[in-house]
Amino acid sequence: MIINIQTLTKQDILEFDKEIQISLPNLRLLSKVTDYTARVYGTVEKSGELYTVKGEVDITLKLVCDRCMRTFDYPLHAILDDQFSTSEELLIGDEDIKRVTKSSVDLSDTILESIAMAMPMKSLCKEDCKGMCLECGANLNEVTCKCDKADIDPRLEALKDIFCLNSKE
């Protein structure tokens, strides 16, 4: 998303509100890219040769639940807060300030960074998601399986097989 900043004078504020298309890689299948529509809005403020961008991004992502592997819609709200400059002196002195041309600011990387930072560490379709059965793979949110739920210490699991063989004889 490119914003024309030529209209800004010394202390002006430029407002923006746009719907844009964003292509994001699927986090589970890195070869697959999904297109999303996002609303990006905020302001660009000029102070000397420094441009400060403050805004927000609203987007609904398709995520896969980490517990039950079901696809679900996840509304995401991200904050934009970045600085750009045309001055080489400012760019050398501060690594957080990004380069800008005299005519426009490209917010594409800033938008992608803010979406990545706002992503949940664990994506869940709902807070109380029961996940999948470790034995049969059934989605426990939809069905109740008949699998044995006994928790066995992995160090003693070999003994389970011995006792099962003895009971069959």
Image (cartoon, rainbow, N blue to C red):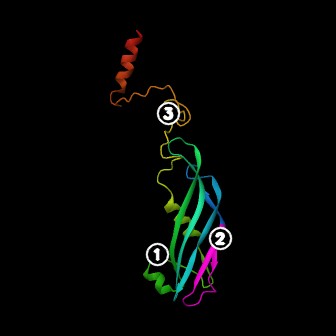
Query: SS class of the residue under badge 1?
Result: loop
Residue 18 numbered mark, or none: 2
Q: Residue at x 49, y 33 (%)?
A: 133
The residues bearing labels 2 and 3 have C-alpha atoms spaced at a distance of: 44 Å
Residue 121 numbered mark, or none: none
Region of the chain picked out in magenta, as a range? 1-19
Vertical side of 150 occupied by 74: above or below: below
Q: Disc 2 or disc 1, which is closer to the eye?
A: 2
Q: Amino acid at mark 2?
A: Lys
- Quadrant containing the C terminus is top left
Q: Is residue 162 left or right of residue 123?
A: left
Vertical side of 4 occupied by 107: above or below: above
The residues bearing labels 3 and 1 have C-alpha atoms spaced at a distance of: 46 Å
Residue 43 spot, x, y in % from top left: 57, 77
Residue 151 spot, x, y in % from top left: 38, 30
In the depicted view, which residue is nearer to us: 59 or 36? 59
Q: Amino acid at mark 1?
A: Asp
Could you classify mark 1 by the number of other residues whose Cα lies within 10 Å: few (under 14), some (14-19), or many (20 or more)?
A: few
Residue to which mark 1 is pinned = 96
Vertical side of 2 occupied by 49: above or below: below
Q: Disc 3 or disc 1, which is closer to the eye?
A: 3
